[in-house]
Amino acid sequence: MTKAWLAPAKINRFLHITGQRSDGYHQLQTVFQFLNYYDELYFTVLDHNEILHKNPLPGVDPEDD
């Protein structure tokens, strides 16, 4: 069964890097505002453990996407 999920648009009002965690990721402080625009993402649950991309990007290896 294919299901649509909404991915709402947002604007970052500000983004501050406040530090770095021990795992290398940064700590962030942000405020964002959702907009009344969105993308629709469609996913189908399959019986196998593969992830298939129906529209691969030219020149981008699947493991880098």
Image (cartoon, helix red, strand yellow):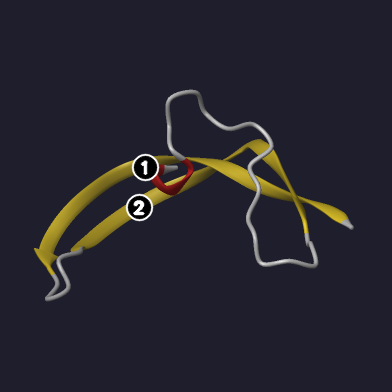
In the rendered image, which quarter is residue 21 located in? bottom left
Residue 43 % position (x, y): 74, 52
> What residue is rendered at 25% in x and 59% in y?
29
Query: Label 2, on which residue?
Result: 31
> What residue is rendered at 11% in x and 66% in y?
20
Residue 35 % position (x, y): 57, 38
> What residue is rendered at 64% in x and 59% in y?
50
Distance, label 2 to label 1, CA atoms, is 6 Å
- Image check: 14 left or right of 8? left
Instruction: Identify which residue, 60 or 39, lies in the foreground.
Output: 60
Instruction: Identify which residue, 38 or 32, lies in the foreground.
Output: 38
Q: Where does the C terminus fall, quadrant-wise?
A: top left
* 47 is higher (above) or lower (below) than 4: below
Residue farthest to the bottom, as pictured? 22
Tell whether label 1 touches label 2 (CB within 8 Å): yes
* 40 is higher (above) or lower (below) than 60: below
Mark 2: which amino acid?
Answer: Val
Mark 1: which amino acid?
Answer: Asn
Q: Which mark is residue 12?
A: 1
Q: Where does the N terminus fall, quadrant-wise?
A: bottom right
Which secondary structure lies at badge 2? strand
> What residue is rendered at 39% in x and 44% in y?
64
- Mark 2 packing: few (<14 Cα in 10 Å), some, or many (20+)? few
Q: Earlier in the sequence, mark 2 or mark 1?
A: 1
- Mark 1 packing: few (<14 Cα in 10 Å), some, or many (20+)? few
